[in-house]
Amino acid sequence: MTNNINWFPGHMRKALNETGERLKLVDIVYETADCRIPFSSRNPELDKIIGDKPRIVVLNKADLADPAKTNQWIDHLAKNGIPACALESNHKKGFDRLNQLTMDLMEEKLNKAAEKGRTGRPVRAMVVGSPNTGKSTLINALAGKKAAVTGDRPGVTKDFKWIMTGGRLELMDMPGVLWPRIATKRSAICLQACGSIKDEVTEVTETAYEIMKILIELYPKLMTERYSVPLDIESSEDDMGYSDPYYDLFLAMGKKRGCVMSGGRVDEERFAKTLLTDLREGRIGRITLEEPDPPKGN
Ligand SMILES: Nc1nc2c(ncn2[C@@H]2O[C@H](COP(=O)(O)OP(=O)(O)O)[C@@H](O)[C@H]2O)c(=O)[nH]1
Ligand SMILES: [Mg+2]
């Protein structure tokens, strides 16, 4: 599977260095992750530049994720010393918890500043995360108006502004961009299925087929409900005596959804697109593709 994020190592390094420079200016970091793929959408390189700066992992798009697994992830991160919260940036849900965590983490620093006579000191925050994790949406939601975000193209130095968000928080209007963790084929598929890596036309069918396998493993009930196909259908052999029950299921689901060409053959690409859109828009249900411990990868 090709990695179609058109960054190269030098570019990534530059983006990381720039983000590191800007991190020096803030008190706290909001690290956005996609709540459905908290493993693959986070980048361990952040740890190297974040130092001992307080950080909150924002599990964004929680509306699309499995609530029980979201809680497992929050517990798992907390056990590893990383406060985390679920957020729905585009529905403005979960912000009270984010504020609470922010103030808990900043309390000591603010008290020290107050002792030195600096009362009412603002808390400066910066949003950092990989593409499509909702950085701009989060900044806009915190800013309370649509406008401020200057852009998040990696490797491009731009001036930034501080946005007053009400309360004590001042937010850098330019997020830091990281890249997702595409260490395994499974990660690549999950990232692509969640829309974090752009669809490559030639790969849509493969991605959909692979994600269907993962979904059947993790959420068999939701899959049968959505596509009205029993998961134990009898598999047929091809001319070479080879059978792939998952491929048969894929075709059966496509047929059921009316993705059929003239002549009766299943239009695999059309069903692939249908399946991916269903998943991305939450129509299959609330789904989390990665378990906290241990992260799945093969
Ligand atoms: N369902 C859902 N979609 C979200 C949420 N936050 C952001 N999005 C969507 O995710 C996509 C990427 O968001 P964006 O803020 O552009 O991500 P960025 O690349 O990190 O800046 C957009 O289509 C947003 O509307 C959320 O909490 N729930
Ligand atoms: Mg953005």
Image (spheres, rainbow, N blue to C red):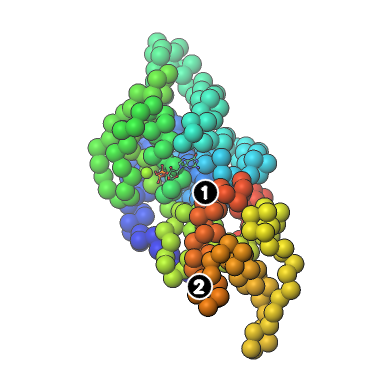
Nearest the viewer among 258 and 176 is: 258
Residue where numbered disc 1 is placed: 281
Instruction: Decide which of tag 1 and tag 2 comes sooner along the chain.
Output: 2
Find residue 11 and report its horizontal and vertical position in percent: 33, 56
| Quadrant in which residue 127 is drawn | top left
Q: Residue at x 64, y 84 (%)?
A: 238
Q: Is residue 15 visible?
A: yes
- Does dot 1 land on a helix, a strand or a loop? loop
- Inspect the image, locate mark 2, and give the three-letter code of the amino acid beneath it: Met
Residue 226 vs 124, above or below: the answer is below
Q: Read off the residue under disc 2.
A: 261
Q: Quadrant of ligand 1?
A: top left
Query: Which of the pair 229/156 is nearer the observer?
Result: 229
Q: Residue furthest front?
A: 262
Q: CA distance from mark 1 to mark 2?
A: 25 Å
Position above or below: 243 against 115: below
Circle 2 Cα neighbour tier, 10 Å, few/some/many (<14 / 14–19 / ≥20) = few
Q: Residue at x 68, y 83 (%)?
A: 237
Question: Is residue 54 shown to the viewer in this render?
Answer: no
**Of 180 and 64, which appears nearest the observer?**
64
Residue type at tag 1: Glu
Q: Position of residue 207 (x, y in %)?
A: 52, 65
- What residue is rendered at 67% in x and 59% in y? 228
Q: Position of residue 161 (x, y in %)?
A: 28, 31
Q: Is mark 2 within 8 Å of ligand 1?
A: no
